Each structure stands twice: as C-alpha cells, then as structure tokens.
Image (tube, grey):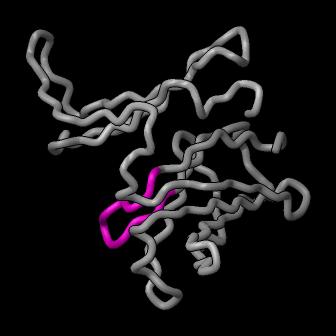
Amino acid sequence: DTNMKYHLRPSAWIEPNQNFGKGSLQLYRFPTKQDSDDNVTMLWVPNEVPEVGQPINLEYTIYWNVNPPKKIAYVVSTRSNQIKEGERQFFIDFKGDILQSFNETNLPTPVVESWNDPIDITNVSLQMIPESEKIRLSFSIPSKHSIKSTELKAYIKDKEEIISETWITTYEHGNQ
C-alpha cells in the first residue's frame, strides 16, 4: 500500500532458539474503526497450557525491521483468478535459497488447507519457474460451498519439514 507504507511500520521476525514443543501459531485479527489501524498479530499457543503461576520458558531471537534470515522460502506474490462462475484459482509464488536444491523431477510437497471450515481444494500443484528462481504453488476452489467464509493456508514442505512461511488468507465464497 503506497499510502499506508506498511513496509516501513514496525515488524518482527521471530526465530526460536529451542523447540517450543507442540502447539500452534494463531493469527489474531481484531476489529478496528479505520483501515490505518494495525490489527493483526500472531500468538504462540502451546498444546499443553501450564498451570497458573507455572513458568513457560521460550528462547527466541527477534529480528526488528530488517530483512529476516531467509532460511525458509518466503511468499513474493499472490494472484487469484475466477475460472468460471464461482470457481476460483490461486497462484502463490515462493522464493528463497532453500528452493534452489529442487528441480522439475524433484519438487517439494505443496500443502493447502482450509483452516476452520473445511472446503474442497483441488488441483494443488507446484511448478518451477527457473527464470525467476521461484516455485509457484497453485490450487482451485470449486464453486459450490455451504459455508460463507473460511481461512485458507498454504505452505511447502520437504518430507516432514516445512520449508516455507505459511500463506494465510480469508476466503469468502461468492465475494472473490
């Protein structure tokens, strides 16, 4: 956004120095009155919450307003296209040094999920784009759904290791 200059606002990349244990990162978006108010944060939620008064020890490094360490692939662009009435196709481009070890015959695994309300996700694939050193993750969402909205998330993994950041968006059926 050229007016809001989000790229200049305070932001951080958090890198664990030790295993946090089982849990999840949860995106929290709170309501605001103006589009200029920042309203998104991520929270670490452990699977086993400690008893009240019991400590939880987490070691991590915070990188402030600098280019984060690019140990994983990162999203560089997202595009969406309506294929036919109500059916939508998504294209997410990832870039990063970790992707350079792959080729057309040895691609990592794309993962696309609907986070809170399950919907059909079809045609999930990865494609190398050697000219730009990117990998494109694409998928489609068929036209018929009984839900109004859901959270979509997508990432790339190599065997069981996640090697990209997670792309997340709200999909609102019929409003895309």
Left or right for 78, reference 74:
right
Position of residue 142 relative to residue 98, above or below, is above
Query: Whole-percent x and y of residue 89?
Result: 75, 61
Q: Which of 143/24 is in front?
A: 24
Q: How many marks?
A: 0
Percent of width and height locating residue 132: 62, 72
Residue depicted at x 85% and y 54%: 86
The residue positioned farthest toward the left in the image shown:
54
131 on left or right of 113: right
The one nearer the camera, 141 or 59, is 59
Q: Position of residue 5 (x, y in %)?
A: 67, 28
- Vertical placement of 46 versus 112: above or below? above
Which residue is found at the position 53% from the left and 87% from the top?
104
Q: Is residue 18 magenta?
A: no
In which image quadrant can residue 40 be found?
A: top right
Q: Magenta stretch: give its range.
A: 155-165
Spot the residue most to the right: 85
Quarter of the image for the C terminus: give it. top right
Q: Quadrant of residue 55?
A: top left
Q: Quadrant of residue 7?
A: top right
Q: Horizontal and vertical percent for residue 43?
A: 38, 28
Q: Residue at x 56, y 73 (%)?
A: 133
Q: Is residue 160 magenta?
A: yes
- The residue under the point 65% across, 72% down is 123
For residue 58, above or below residue 169: above
Quadrant in the picture for the N terminus: top right
